[in-house]
């Protein structure tokens, strides 16, 4: 699973009558940021003052991330961080929902309304898998600032805070302490998705570029999300009512068999 998969799974909370996804409009931008974080952690990209630089175009293990990496490398001119985040497709949450369905982590019913638009109802979620994810997040929160900035779970924790998913991860009165710790952790670390030390790098200059690029990403990614969220009016509608799947963006799974509508899964 990628950080984006984990983020969406954490965003799924029980509503009054059904499962729902919390803060979908904020979530899609956090999903886009998580892809950069994962690619940074893998040593594939660095973020400079003006553009995202592909340092290693070789595919990574996850097909979607490989497609995102390819899109970044093919973009001319190379995109800046703010521009890349602001061009997040509205379909992104639906794409990740399809990924979780392929992984058997959720069950989704797809249907078409009177206008022909595809709607999505969440029928169930893999609760043991989500609980294990919550346990990982809790360990990060309890460890505090001592956590290594290279830790993928720390990246996840800070993105949870940025996307306002803390109430989903630490719900109710019992979660007050966890929510406070999560906010404090995000304030200390900003966003720390990568160190550039994911694997051996023979060239010293390249290693330095990876590390400095990760430092820029650490300082800037959460800040760009904050600026973007300030400009976006969020709706608060449920997934079945407010999300337009639209066209599949770059990095879509492609050929998964779950992208169609008009049937129940």
Image: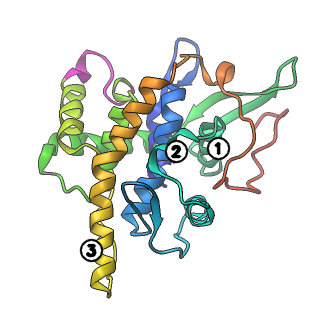
Q: Residue at x 33, y 33 (%)?
A: 161
Q: CA distance from mark 2 to mark 3?
A: 25 Å
Q: Residue at x 66, y 38 (%)?
A: 91
Residue closest to the far bottom: 202
Q: Quadrant of residue 132?
A: top left
Picture coordinates of residue 158 (x, y %)?
Answer: 31, 40
Provide the residue designation for mark 2: 83
Provide the residue designation for mark 3: 208
Element type at marker 1? helix
* First in residue order: circle 1 vs circle 2: 2
Provide the residue designation for mark 1: 95
Task: Bin the neighbour count of mark 3 within 10 Å (Cα to Cα): few under 14, some 14-19, many 20 and up.
Answer: some
Which tag is nearer the camera, tag 1 or tag 3? 3
**Residue 174 lies in the magenta stretch:** yes
Query: Looking at the image, how many numbered discs can be counted on the residues?
Result: 3
Q: Residue at x 24, y 20 (%)?
A: 174
Quadrant into which the C terminus falls? top right
Picture coordinates of residue 182 (x, y %)?
Answer: 23, 33
Element type at marker 3? helix
Residue closest to the far top: 16
Question: Which of the pair 112/265 is nearer the observer?
Answer: 112
Q: CA distance from mark 1 to mark 2?
A: 20 Å
Q: CA distance from mark 1 to mark 3?
A: 34 Å
Residue closest to the far left: 146
**Magenta part of the protein: which range?**
168-176
Q: Is residue 153 left or right of residue 128?
A: left
Element type at marker 2? helix
- Marks 1 & 2, CB-CB < 8 Å contact: no
SS majority, magenta:
helix
Q: Residue at x 56, y 44 (%)?
A: 105
């Amino acid at each position: 699973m990628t950080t984006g998969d984990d983020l969406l799974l954490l965003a799924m909370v029980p509503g009054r009558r059904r499962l729902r996804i919390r803060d979908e409009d904020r979530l899609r931008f956090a999903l886009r940021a998580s892809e950069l974080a994962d690619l940074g952690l893998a040593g594939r990209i660095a973020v400079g003052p003006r553009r995202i630089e592909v340092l290693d175009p070789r595919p990574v293990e996850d097909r979607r991330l490989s497609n995102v990496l390819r899109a970044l490398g093919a973009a001319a001119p190379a995109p800046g961080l703010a521009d890349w985040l602001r061009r997040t497709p509205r379909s992104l949450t639906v794409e990740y929902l399809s990924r979780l369905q392929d992984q058997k982590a959720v069950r989704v019913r797809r249907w078409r309304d009177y206008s022909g638009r595809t709607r999505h109802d969440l029928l169930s979620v893999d609760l043991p898998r989500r609980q294990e994810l919550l346990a990982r997040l809790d360990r990060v929160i309890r460890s505090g600032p001592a956590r290594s900035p290279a830790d993928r779970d720390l990246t996840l924790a800070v993105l949870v805070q940025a996307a306002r998913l803390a109430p989903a991860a630490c719900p109710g009165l019992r979660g007050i302490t966890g929510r406070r710790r999560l906010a404090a952790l995000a304030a200390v670390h900003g966003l720390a998705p990568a160190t550039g030390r994911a694997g051996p790098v023979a060239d010293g200059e390249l290693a330095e570029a990876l590390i400095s690029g990760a430092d820029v990403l650490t300082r800037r990614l959460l800040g760009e999300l904050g600026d973007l969220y300030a400009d976006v009016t969020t709706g608060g509608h449920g997934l079945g009512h407010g999300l337009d799947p639209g066209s599949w963006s770059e990095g879509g799974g492609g050929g998964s068999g779950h992208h169609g509508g008009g049937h129940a899964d």
